[in-house]
Image: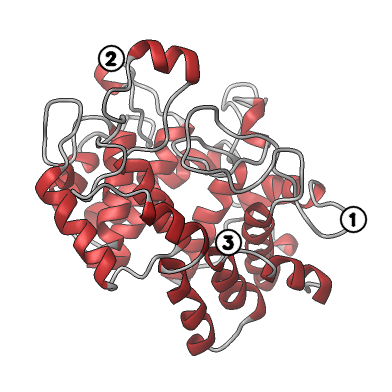
Amino acid sequence: MSVDRPLIDWLLDSDPAIRWQVLRDIVGAPEREWQAERCKVEREGWGAELLACQDADGQWAGGAFVPAGYTEDMWRTAGQPWTATCFSLQQLYDFGLDPACERAQRTVALIGFNSKWDHDGQPFWDGEVEECINARTVTAGAYFGVDVSPIVKRLLGERQPDGGWNCERCNGSHRSSFHTTINVLEALLAYESAKGQTPETRAARAAGEDYLLKRELYKRLETGQPADERYLKLLYPPRWRYDVLRGLDYFRLASLAGGTPPDARLRTPIAHLRARQALNGTWPLDWQLTGPVWFKMEEVGKPSRWITLRALRVLRWWDAAGVDTRQPQS
């Protein structure tokens, strides 16, 4: 799809974390240009602000998953906190902090030495027991050059009979969830990008992808109705949450990584995404998760540069393949 210059200018009038991705994915700028912009993430804007919040021991807020001293009463009153190490690393990954830079490498080493999971004191890069948490640890670890193979092996053994994953497995669940499945799929793809694909990871991804595709990314298999109306709302940052744009962006990345065309079963969520675009070419931020954050980047109800960037690159990928003319796959 073509993108009008005023819309590109609006996207570029933003933080380096967004600008470098616009230059790479929308403008098609030379690598030297978008890499130069990407380097600014460490020194300017949101990336620099988040790094300035880091503790001397490499953690954020003194904890792996929950800030130090954050009580159950605080959780009930203020909501789930998003300031601890797990979520801060996830955000730096989204920002595109150069994993080879000295600050990133020092952070990885310090976290490995100092950060322990709240569950049972496990070292951070060993993971813990919950699939969503372990998946995000794999995504960050693979990106920043950590060997997270043992966590991947664990995730591969925790797949549900219907093809996906569910972090309530330890509480007896035998059905997959959209939330956990997208977290694990992103993690396996990030691991393959760093270490290479194995028959086990490819088979697991194929099963998880099929779980989502059978449901057209948001529907109940039994009724064809939305499994959760919020899956059709646009959210950023997603943290552990699922929405259709997150699902579509995963399938875009998987398609590009594997050199495979888009699956025609994505036609319905693609149509939904198109329908949400405003006349000025932007997409809105529909909602955000509650709970303490280091800083807010965008306002609910307003046009969102994060969501517009992600939506535009999904549609460019889809339109380039011309999938709308194909018959749905069985």
Circles 3 and 1, Cβ within 8 Å, touching? The answer is: no
- Which kind of residue does numbered mark 2 sit on? Asn
Instruction: Give the residue number, with chain letter if any, for mark 1.
Output: 279
> Left or right: 171 with respect to 247?
left
How far apart in space, not on screen, are marks 3 and 1 (Cα)?
Answer: 26 Å
Instruction: Give the residue number, with chain letter if any, for mark 3.
Output: 262
Tag 2: Cα neighbours inside 10 Å, few (<14), some, or many (≥20)? few
Secondary element type, mark 1: loop
Nearest to the observer: residue 236 or residue 245: 236
How far apart in space, not on screen, are marks 2 and 3 (Cα)?
Answer: 35 Å
Secondary element type, mark 3: loop
Q: Tell me where residue 198 sits by quadrant.
A: bottom left
Q: Is residue 174 above or below residue 125?
A: above
Nearest to the observer: residue 265 or residue 274: 274
Q: Residue at x 68, y 71 (%)?
A: 12
Instruction: Give the residue number, with chain letter if any, for mark 2.
Output: 171
**Sequence-wise, which precedes: disc 2 or disc 3?**
2
Rendered location of residue 99, percent (x, y): 31, 68
